[in-house]
Image: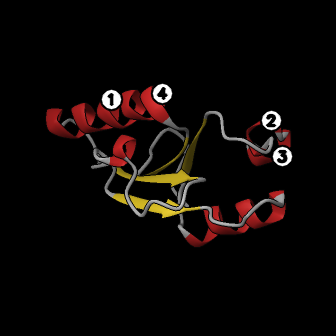
Amino acid sequence: MNTFGTMSRLGVIERGEGAVRVLQAAAELNHAGDGVPITTVLFHAGRDPRPWYGREADEVRSLGDAVLDDDVVAQLQRAAIDTLWLGDLPGGAARRADLVA
């Protein structure tokens, strides 16, 4: 786990334009070269292995049938992310306060 104030693996639970904006912002930070490179990991609910809004992501992972919040949390842990952008996905996972704790 990183110390407070640094991030190296950014998980993104978002779709569409929101995902694109977050991923582009991380790419711009990486391009500036002022800090630790940020690896982006997009989590999405669709079956497409690489949705159009994941084109800027370093890694793309489908949540597949992870409809239970515990399944989503387990996938986030397996990806070893240290920071999470919690946007909006169907099913309510993004509204769970314990995902941001």
SS for tag 1? Answer: helix
> Mark 3 belongs to which amino acid?
Asp
Q: Earlier in the sequence, mark 2 or mark 4?
A: 4
> For the residue labelled by badge 3, is the local secondary structure a helix, a strand or a loop?
helix
Query: Where's residue 46, x and y in %?
Result: 55, 55
Image quadrant in which you'd find residue 20:
top left
Q: Residues within 10 Å of mark 4 (few under 14, many from 20)?
A: some
| Residue in the image at 48% along x and 27% along y | 18
- The quarter of the picture where the C terminus appears is top right
Instruction: Give the mark nearest the N terminus, 3 or 1.
Output: 1
Distance of mark 1 from mark 4, alpha carbons?
Answer: 11 Å
| For the residues bearing labels 3 and 2, Cβ distance under 8 angstroms | no
Q: CA distance from mark 2 to mark 1?
A: 23 Å
Looking at the rendered structure, the kind of residue marked 1 is Ala
Crowding at dot 1, Cα within 10 Å, few <14 / some 14-19 / many 20+, comes out as few
State which tag comes first along the sequence, 3 or 4. Answer: 4
Q: Position of residue 52 (x, y in %)?
A: 35, 44
Give the residue at mark 1: 25
Report the residue marked by disc 2.
95
Q: Nearer the viewer, residue 49 or 74?
A: 49
The answer to whether the residue labelled 1 contacts the one labelled 4, judged by CB atoms less than 8 Å apart, is no
Q: Which mark is residue 99?
A: none
Label at residue 18: 4
Label annotation for residue 98 = 3
The label nearer to you, 3 versus 4, is 4
From what the image shows, is residue 88 above or below residue 63?
Answer: above
For badge 2, the amino acid type reads Arg
